[in-house]
Amino acid sequence: MPTERFQFTGEGGHQLAAALDMPDGPVHAYALFAHCFTCGKDVLAAKRIATALAARGIAVLRFDFTGLGSSEGDFANSTFSSNVADLVRAAVHLRETRGAPALLIGHSLGGAAILAAAGQIPEAKAVVTIAAPSDPVHVTHLFRDRIEDIRAQGKVEVQLAGRPFHIKREFLDDIAEHSLAVHIAKLHKALLVMHSPTDDTVGIDNATKIFVAARHPKSFVSLSGADHLLSGKRDAAYVAGIIAAWAERYIEPIAAQPAAASEAPRNVVVRETRNGKFQQIVTAGPHEMLADEPLAAGGQDTGPGPYDFLLTGLGACTSMTMRMYADRKSLPLERVTVTLKHSKIHARDCEECETREGMLDQIDRVITIEGALDADQRARLMEIADKCPVHRTLKSEIRIVTKAAD
């Protein structure tokens, strides 16, 4: 399975190192994974679970929290709240570059963090905790003999899993303010609690408290024989298999991409005809068409202009993606019509845009949906429109490589 490595900006402004484990084939759903306390994205449990889920069509984003692994920042300045904020930032990055996470998974303290963050990730439909404490304060038992020193001195070095870490008084104060039970009660998402009855780091009673506090739908799976870190390869594979099978009931597969997107990309060749100032012959596989500029721009208007082709690609992709989703869900969608317009606007007129000066490109897209669909079905189809591959390409960072022909 391919793994894409990149960075994104965390809540504190630091660059956080991330890995996105992708399936070899189509992506059925995106998941966000939160690792255990003082671990990292490359801890064996995280890597093995992510790889196994990717093999089942679920792309998994895992990342190092602030000050851990390859991420920037000082671990001593991180708190439970900052971890939760970083998870939300990770979900935002995934939403903007790929697709919002439908599945949230947290291991150990990462499980507590994922429960606290879930309410801020509306697209998530299912949440999984693995060996998670029912209260983030539980983590202090790892350095309970130094708690008084931390409170008295403000910052103390402690040994965790054989490595030195600095813990500040602010960390203790922060976790004391979190009531995980409140987040669990208001989850409004399917919950799967996984825990080993022989876990000697986070006792099984924590799983009981999480399960009791949650509302249905909820499930529990015993990881009998597994240790807290799921160090056994078979245990991690078992966890991934259960998660994938369980999540199918609650998460909707991402709309399939147009068939052409799964084939080897074919070249598009654009060549001047020398008939008029701007006329071009465009060849895409077996298809040929003319491109030109309108009369007002000095052309002959014998074919669509460059921006017409751009809008055509977005409009066609939008309609195709909505059609495939509707057919898969057996929705009574009769026809989709997409009307698009390209224009330039002043940056200052766009409140949500980062650019504040000069002019910006704007594409207005109006979608007409015909058929006997209810309000929820229409709303879902409009959400699917933004998942079309061309839309995602236009919204993402694009690299264009230009070179002279041999």
Image (cartoon, rainbow, N blue to C red):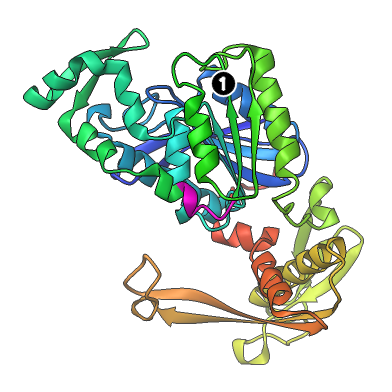
Left or right: residue 163 versus residue 297 is left
Could you classify mark 1 by the number of other residues whose Cα lies within 10 Å: few (under 14), some (14-19), or many (20 or more)? many
The local secondary structure at tag 1 comes to helix
Q: Can you tell which quarter of the image residue 13 is in? A: top left
Numbered range of the magenta stretch: 184-189
Q: Can you tell which quarter of the image residue 352 is in? A: bottom left
Residue at point 59%, 48% (across, down): 401
**Dominant SS type (magenta):** loop
Q: Can you tell which quarter of the image residue 135 is in? A: top left
Residue at point 75%, 63% (across, down): 270
Q: Closer to the camera, 388 or 247?
A: 247
Q: Quadrant of the N terminus?
A: top right
Coordinates of residue 305 in the picture (x, y in percent): 68, 78
Left or right: residue 171 versus residue 260 is left
Coordinates of residue 79 in the picture (x, y in percent): 28, 36
Name the residue at the top extreme: 162
Q: Closer to the camera, 404 or 317?
A: 317
Does 363 appear above or below 66?
A: below
Does 247 appear above or below 313?
A: above
Does 78 appear above or below 363?
A: above
Name the residue at the bottom extreme: 296
For disc 1, the marked residue is 45
Coordinates of residue 45 in the picture (x, y in percent): 56, 21
